[in-house]
Amino acid sequence: MLKYIIIDDEPLAHEIIEEFCSMLPHVQLEKNCYNAMEAMQYLNENTVDFMFLDINMPKLRGLDFLKTLTKPPKTIITTAYKEHALEGFELNVIDYILKPFSFDRLVKAVNKVSDTQTTKTIIKEVSNETTSTRFFVKGDKKHHQIDLNDLLFIEAYGNYTKLFLKDEMIVSHEKISHYESILTEGDFLRVHKSFIVAVDKIKFIEGNRILIIEHKIPIGQTYKNSINKLYNS
């Protein structure tokens, strides 16, 4: 688990970062700081893995605050001012993202922090069968038990994956190759570099797409032979 703090004088910025980070299963918010002095006091007494740092704050600018730290946490600059990017990277910040930023952009920044970290998905055998019908995925600060009967398809999302179930979608910190290795061959099929589908959930195949309920999933050129075997066998 990666622990982080937010340092920003705007409450809305805290809300956005918290909301985005709540979808990432391997990060945990430790403290909301609304100025650099508050953050300085907290870091003198506590250790975190990384921080989101705004530049334009009253009394002490974010970058000036960063210069005061002898061993700063890994830092992601969040600001509306792109002209300070060079100065930020000279201070060895991990990333520099411009407000307003998307979830995708924040994920890319956090990935740079977690490059050396690994979060393992817990696989649990719950039956006497040779293959497990359930497993656990950590997402949104919870361990979700996934019933394979409810799993529709999996979509790659950078270094993450989205697991689409009948009634919900869960973001997992595992790459799609991980799920390809643990899911039963024959029941699940890789149909695109970014998609694995549950074969029994396919409604129809038309041209270069698969329909599962209302979801339209593309078929990759290199996976067409595997798809053809479904109805030509």
Image: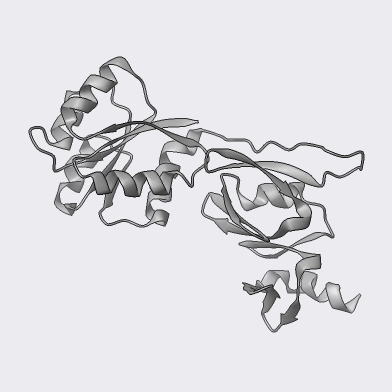
Q: Taking 22 as reference, is 204 left or right?
A: right
Residue 219 percent location from the top left of the image:
67, 73
Q: Is residue 70 visible?
A: no
Quick check: 153 above or below 148? below
Task: Work out which residue is located at the far bottom of the displayed protein and give it.
Answer: 207
Out of 211 and 166, give the one closest to the viewer.
Answer: 166
| Location of residue 193 in the rendering, given as x and y in whole percent from the top left corner | 63, 62
Near-viewer residue (72 or 90)? 72
Of residue 192 and residue 4, the one placed in the foreground of this image is 4
Q: Quadrant of residue 165?
A: bottom right
Q: Quadrant of residue 43?
A: top left
Asked if residue 62 shows in the view, the reply is yes
Quadrant location of the C terminus in the rendered image: bottom right
Q: Given the current orientation, which residue lies at the most extreme left position?
A: 59
Q: Where does residue 33 sit, x and y in percent of width and height?
A: 25, 32
Instruction: Name the quadrant containing residue 42.
Output: top left
Residue occupying the point 14% across, 51% down: 83
Image point 22% across, 34% down: which residue?
Answer: 91
Most extreme residue toward the front is 167
